[in-house]
């Protein structure tokens, strides 16, 4: 297992090539888990609406995980594109990225983070992770209201 000395977290532009590579790997994994490529209700994130994008890089500078924030309103942001390469799962990268996103949100005055992930059948690991990190299930909202494959979470940061 890798340790925290094997990686660091850096802010990057949404269109950073390493971040794009991670998002493509995430998309491929989700396509396989859901059995299709139509599993994201609502607009896909873009450089126009992701205000924060963090990338975890290993000692060689290779991106191994990422996560972003999309502002929903003056006090709320949404976690987008949390992903860690399979070989780095269980190493502490995901909790560190999420903690860095939470710290950034606090610094911007956003007191609540929300997120959407897949249902327990397809994404049991993600659901366990978010609950372990203090996120509580909430009713589906926005673009996810009618999505049978979505589970939504929220965490108050104040």
Image (spheres, helix red, strand yellow):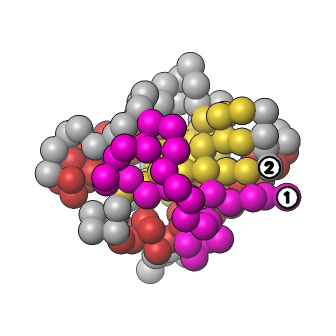
Q: Residue furthest left?
A: 35
The picture places residue 69, in percent across and down from the top left corner, at 61, 40
Q: Characterize the local packing of mark 1: few (<14), some (14-19) or many (20 or more) Cα atoms within 10 angstroms.
A: few
Q: Is residue 139 magenta?
A: yes
Q: Is residue 98 above or below residue 16?
A: below
In the rendered structure, the answer to whether residue 100 lies left or right of residue 121 reads right
The picture places residue 56, in percent across and down from the top left corner, at 55, 53
Name the image quarter holding the C terminus: bottom right
Element marked by disc 2: loop
Examine the rendering and report whether any part of residue 87 can be seen.
Answer: yes
Q: Quadrant of residue 6?
A: bottom right
Examine the rendering and report whether any part of residue 11 can be seen.
Answer: no
The answer to which of marks 2 and 1 sits earlier in the sequence is 2
Q: Are marks 2 and 1 in contact (CB under 8 Å)?
A: yes
The circle on residue 42 is none
Residue identified by numbered label 2: 111
Residue identified by numbered label 1: 158
Q: CA distance from mark 2 to mark 1?
A: 6 Å
In the rendered structure, the answer to whether residue 91 lies left or right of residue 124 reads right
The picture places residue 154, in percent across and down from the top left corner, at 63, 57
Q: Quadrant of residue 87?
A: bottom left
Q: Nearer the viewer, residue 35 or 154?
A: 154
* Identity of the residue drawn at 34% across and 46% down: 147
Q: Which residues are magenta?
A: 131-158
* Identity of the residue drawn at 65% across and 34% down: 72
Q: Is residue 108 magenta?
A: no
Q: Nearer the viewer, residue 58 or 77?
A: 77
Element marked by disc 1: loop
Q: Is residue 115 above or below residue 136?
A: above
């Amino acid at each position: 297992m890798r340790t925290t000395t094997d990686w660091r977290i850096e802010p990057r532009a949404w269109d950073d090539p390493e971040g794009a590579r991670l998002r493509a790997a995430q998309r491929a994994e989700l396509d396989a888990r859901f059995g299709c490529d139509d599993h994201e209700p609502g607009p896909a994130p873009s450089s126009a609406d992701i205000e924060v994008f963090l990338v975890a890089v290993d000692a060689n500078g290779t991106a191994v995980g990422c996560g972003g924030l999309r502002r929903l309103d003056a006090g709320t942001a949404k976690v987008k594109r949390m992903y860690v390469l399979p070989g780095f799962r269980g190493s502490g990268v995901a909790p560190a990225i999420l903690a860095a996103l939470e710290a950034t949100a606090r610094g911007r005055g956003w007191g609540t983070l929300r997120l959407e992930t897949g249902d327990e059948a397809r994404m049991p690991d993600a659901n366990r992770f978010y609950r372990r990190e203090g996120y509580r299930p909430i009713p589906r909202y926005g673009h996810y209201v009618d999505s049978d494959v979505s589970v939504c979470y929220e965490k108050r940061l104040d």
